[in-house]
Image (spheres, helix red, strand yellow):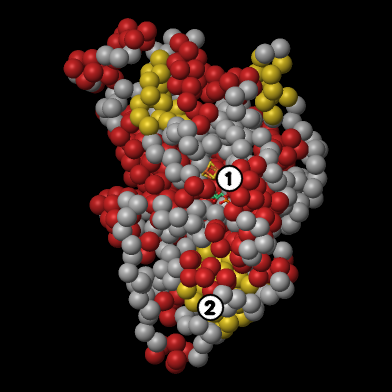
Amino acid sequence: MSLNAVLEGVTGRIIQRSTPTRRRYLDLIARQQDRGVNRPRLACGNLAHAFAAAGYDKQTIRAGSGMNIGIVSAYNDMLSAHQPYSRYPDQMRLFARELGATAQVAGCVPAMCDGVTQGQPGMELSLFSRDTIALSTAVALSHGMFEGAALLGICDKIVPGLLMGALRFGHLPMILVPAGPMGSGLPNKAKQEIRQLFSEGKVGREELLEAEAASYHSPGTCTFYGTANTNQMMMEVMGLHVPGAAFVPPNTKLRQALTREAVHRLVAMGAEGDDYRPLARCIDEKAIVNAAVGLLATGGSTNLAIHLPAIARAAGIIIDWEDLDRLSSAVPLLTRIYPNGTADVNGFHAAGGMGFVIGTLLDEGLLHDDILTVAAGGLHAYAGTPELKDDVLTWGERRVHSGDETILRPATAPFRADGGMRLMQGNLGRGIFKTSAVAPERWTIEAAAAVFDDQEDVLRAFRAGELNRDVIVVVRFQGPAANGMPELHKLTPSLSVLQDRGYRVALVTDGRMSGASGKVPAVIHLTPEALPNGPLAYVQNGDTIRLSAGDGSINVLVDQAEWSARIPATQPEQEDGTGRELFSFMRTGADGAEQGASAMLAAMENRAS
Ligand SMILES: O=C(O)[C@H](O)[C@@H](O)[C@H](O)[C@H](O)COP(=O)(O)O
Ligand code: SF4
């Protein structure tokens, strides 16, 4: 099947737009390869410090006889998805030795759990923790001791941050090593229903805590299709995992075999061998487009509408929300995984998972099949599903049929002909609407605005019964510059209650929502943000707002003369504490959500221009 024309057009548009920055990036990577810091160029003192504690591997590292793998790990044992990483370095050292290579933990990076910080002050550090992870990844790899890198990370900001830092060392081969989802617990929909009852005061805290603990109950990634699992999907369609590694459960023989294969593939991709696969060539414009297609085809997290532009920029590639919107018109919606349905990623994996998604998209010319993947067999290898046969890792024949068409469908008979995300534009700016998580009859709403500067004030108004009407809840001063662009997912239960009471409800904000947010129409990431004088700063209580994902419009219906005479609202005094004050420089320097909301990248490019 030939490549889909829309895909071809958008890819061409990105390549053309990115030519100067991609050229600059590839020149830097070539210089790094030719004369960047590496083991042979290190002085004796540098080397001795690096292998002093290497024990069994000391002589091998000293001799420089095989690849020394730098492990960059986001392990911590509070974050359920990363808890399984605790023993990975020891295992990976053994797997590396099987091929005469070595592995050292080059550095660890922080990993915030957005579930723990959801609705808490810490959420104001969440987006900027991504750039902190990128900086920490660069610190780890800056030692020049490594000929390849294994990146251990899964959750929301961690995979984007690892890639943004690792891409600056794009002359090295790299691989993402996942750990897999926890087993299915209390279904996400049941958990959400108990949250709604709690928000109405109909159940108590103990009952709610019991439900939450039954939903999040053991090591592994949470099983809703949020940002973490969207990251895993993305690593598959970009060919940066061992094929099918995304959703195999942790602490299983198959999982260990996949980790072993990751180490062996990394060694095979080294510059010394005959199959050199540097990260800079694996992540090119086509791989970025594949990631966008995967995001739209699976109804992935809206957070990737911010992270994917940032990852692309770190590779010298410029994408925008128009690219996503154009692709959305051609990419069908193939999956129904919570919040876009009731199934979880375990049910999705059992129904055929990423292998089936990649296979059907390839069949319809909806993925670039000529990207450089970490698997030897190219992207077609990702249409298979890994299994152990007599303890040997194999990839069975690709599945031609979905194992459950309520969860997963072929591109020839999708749930929807268009993708799960829509660009919204109008006199309130540009934002994102996740269509896959909202019933189509709720895609268009016109109602009076109730304007808030803080999500807690929304909850107070809800509890006081002040929102029992058709209402568009505007929550502003939630952008990167204002307070670090937190997720406002804590509003979901209350807004869902209003919707279930029969009101027409929507959320409009310059902030973010969780990948787990759904059901209630929301236009998020509005750019330019309210601070200091974006359009949201001029909206007043009672203004009529009309938004429609049908035609991608969002407008406040106020007489132009009156609008022009208004002065912008000012941001309320911000609280310090919980470390928020440390990130002031990132708030000051961050650019817009559509560019990736990164002070780090903005400063890097300003210096380069
Ligand atoms: O984007 C995401 O996927 C979310 O940030 C997710 O990682 C976050 O942890 C949610 O808050 C979890 O969902 P609940 O808050 O509903 O448990
Ligand atoms: S998926 Fe979200 S809630 Fe679950 S461990 Fe990762 S960051 Fe935490």
Closer to the camera, 39 or 500?
500
Where residue 285 appears, as percent x and y from the top left, is: 50, 45
Mark 1: which secondary structure? helix
Asked if one can make out residue 537 in the rendered structure from this viewpoint, the answer is: yes
Where residue 538 appears, as percent x and y from the top left, is: 43, 80
Q: Is residue 172 above or below residue 407?
A: above
Residue where numbered disc 1 is placed: 230
Identify the image quadrant of the C terminus: bottom left
Mark 2: which secondary structure? strand
Identify the image quadrant of the N terminus: top right
Closer to the camera, 96 or 154?
154
Q: Residue at x 53, y 78 (%)?
A: 450
The 10 Å Cα crowd at callout 1, few under 14, some 14 to 19, many 20 or more, is: many
Where residue 496 appears, as percent x and y from the top left, is: 65, 65
Horizontal placement of 259 versus 60: left or right? right
Q: Quadrant of residue 291?
A: top right
Where residue 396 appears, as percent x and y from the top left, is: 73, 24
Q: Residue at x 63, y 72 (%)?
A: 505
Q: Residue at x 40, y 21 (%)?
A: 69
* Among the two numbered marks 2 and 1 on one chain, the one whose residue lies closer to the N terminus: 1
Residue where numbered disc 2 is placed: 450
Please name the amino acid that badge 1 sits on.
Thr
Asked if one can make out residue 378 in the rendered structure from this viewpoint, the answer is: no
Q: Residue at x 39, y 90 (%)?
A: 565
Closer to the camera, 31 or 342?
342
Q: Is residue 241 above or below residue 209?
A: above
